[in-house]
Image (cartoon, rainbow, N blue to C red):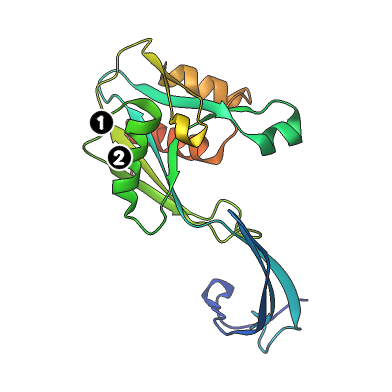
Amino acid sequence: MVVKSEKNLKELSPSRVEVLNRERLLDDFFKVDRYTLQYELFGGGMGPVMKRLVFERGDAVAVLPYDPETGMVVLIKQFRCPAYVREGDGWLWETIAGMLDGQQPEDVVRREAMEEAHLTLDELEYVATVFPSGGACSERLFVYLAPISIESGWQCLGGLESESEDILVCSFPLDEAVRMMREGQMKTATVVIALQHLLLKRAGISC
């Protein structure tokens, strides 16, 4: 459908949503709701009634520790069942991360840094808040950088046994981490977002 308008199309801003019904299909560690709704169209009027599934897992926070002097970054690697099911290799390089559960992002990210990587974080640099999969999941993800002194070749094992966590923690030169990302060895969204933001920051590009 082609809409002719004297207005700039970017200025169109539909806002009306009518939720006719919500039904919880799964109520476990993760939750799934089925919504019956309709929403306002860019071209005017309301669209047809439709059903949509929403995967509800709560909000999360992620952080990439980096050394402003040397450019070293800290990443973690752990097993993820969905990645294993999808590709056959379930061990992913990730940023330190955790679920908010009603707490403040800064508090959670500092706690997770200690639990997962034995790191004490002071200053935090906010990067962005994103929907990692807005077509399916209601999760918002708060992404940070954290300047910290990091030794070259630093590594350890982290995670909580009580949560069945088995985490490898390693430092990388930024160039090596970027190379691994370009070669497809680092696939998680938070790693890509944080590394690209750090590259722009070190190039003096404000974003």
The residue wearing badge 1 is 120
Q: Residue furthest top?
A: 153
Of the residues shown, which amino acid type is indicated by label 1?
Thr
Q: In the rendered structure, are the residues bearing label 2 and label 1 in contact, judged by CB atoms less than 8 Å apart?
A: yes
What kind of element bears circle 2?
Answer: helix
Return the residue nearer the eye: 94 or 85: 85
Asked whether, in this view, residue 127 is left or right of residue 124, the answer is right
Where residue 121 appears, x then y in whole percent? 26, 34
Where residue 160 appears, x then y in whole percent? 43, 31
Q: Residue at x 48, y 40 (%)?
A: 193
What kind of element bears circle 1?
Answer: loop
Q: Can residue 205 be seen in this view?
A: no
Q: Say the numbered circle drawn on residue 110.
A: 2
Q: Is residue 140 visible?
A: yes
Asked whether, in this view, residue 207 is left or right of residue 19, the answer is left
Q: Residue furthest left?
A: 122
